Image (cartoon, rainbow, N blue to C red):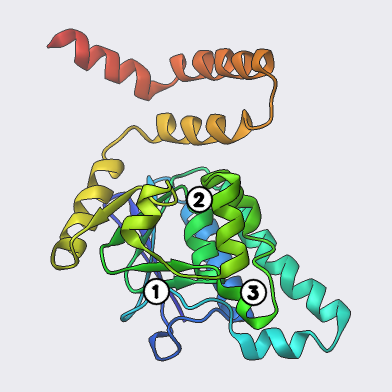
Amino acid sequence: MIEYAAAGGVARITLNRPDKRNAITSGMMSALRDALQHSADDSTVRVVLIRGAGKDFCAGLDLSEVLKSAEDAQVSLASARQLGDLYIAMRRHPKPIISAVQGRALGGGAGIATASDLIIAAESAQFGYPEVKLGFIPAIVTTMLRRAVNERQAMELALTGDPLSASRAHAISLINRVYPDAEFDTEVERYIARLAGQPATAMSLSKHLLYATEGMSFEASIEAGVQANVQARATDDFKRGVERFLKK
């Protein structure tokens, strides 16, 4: 239910359960974690692309599994923690993770997209955190959602459960880019190829620094930047990049 392939500096992870709108089972979460780890360990991979097979990106968690887990507190805790650990693994992944969203990204599916470093979407795509309509809450994804949009927008999304169009999601800074449906696949490939052509160490250091400075004091954040600056100067990517620039 998870497909993985790597070529040209891009690890492609596909949620492959289209008959169920790619609803996520516990087994899929484990397979997704394995795929992420494989891409992290592969030195040829520069960026990771997550997509959904079929019409939708992901409809969220498999609700039949969630309902069954609710019968046992320990099973319920393990299930919730598995999803939380997935989001943490995405944040700690050394390479940029991009979700390319077509169709619907709802609940835990919107969570996977929101936990990614970058999100690009087809103009007909929809995002939503509809858990409240089921008497549930978008509990774990709130951590990323609150960081992506402002407090009032996050509150409205959580309390209404209403879906967002791609254009609206872009307007509130939930996603990075929106492309016409007819051009989406082409634009995804162009976007990914551009990132895959960037120096890998520079991207990795940038991702780490942006997340590491969150919550730091101004002085601590500056010092973290100083240390990252020095670290970047010592990389082969930097030396080669400067040499190319000076030869122009």
Q: Which residue is mark 2?
A: 40
- Closest to the camera, between mark 1 and mark 2, is 1
Neighbourhood count class around disc 3 (C-alpha, 10 Å): few under 14, some 14–19, many 20 upward: some
Residue 165 lies, in percent from the top left, at: 35, 64
Q: Amino acid at mark 1?
A: Arg
Neighbourhood count class around disc 1 (C-alpha, 10 Å): few under 14, some 14–19, many 20 upward: many
Indicate which disc, 3 or 2, sits on the residue closer to the N terminus. 2
Is residue 159 depicted above or below 43 in this figure? below
Indicate which disc, 1 or 3, sits on the residue closer to the N terminus. 1
Q: Spatial distance from mark 3 to mark 2, Cα to Cα?
A: 35 Å
Residue 78 lies, in percent from the top left, at: 78, 73
Q: Spatial distance from mark 1 to mark 3, Cα to Cα?
A: 17 Å
Q: Which residue is mark 3?
A: 132
Would residue 34 be visible to someone looking at this image?
no
Q: Which residue is mark 1?
A: 104
Residue at horizontal 67 percent and vertical 87 percent from the top: 65
Q: Is residue 28 left or right of residue 236?
A: right
Q: Which sits in the foreground, 46 or 166?
A: 166
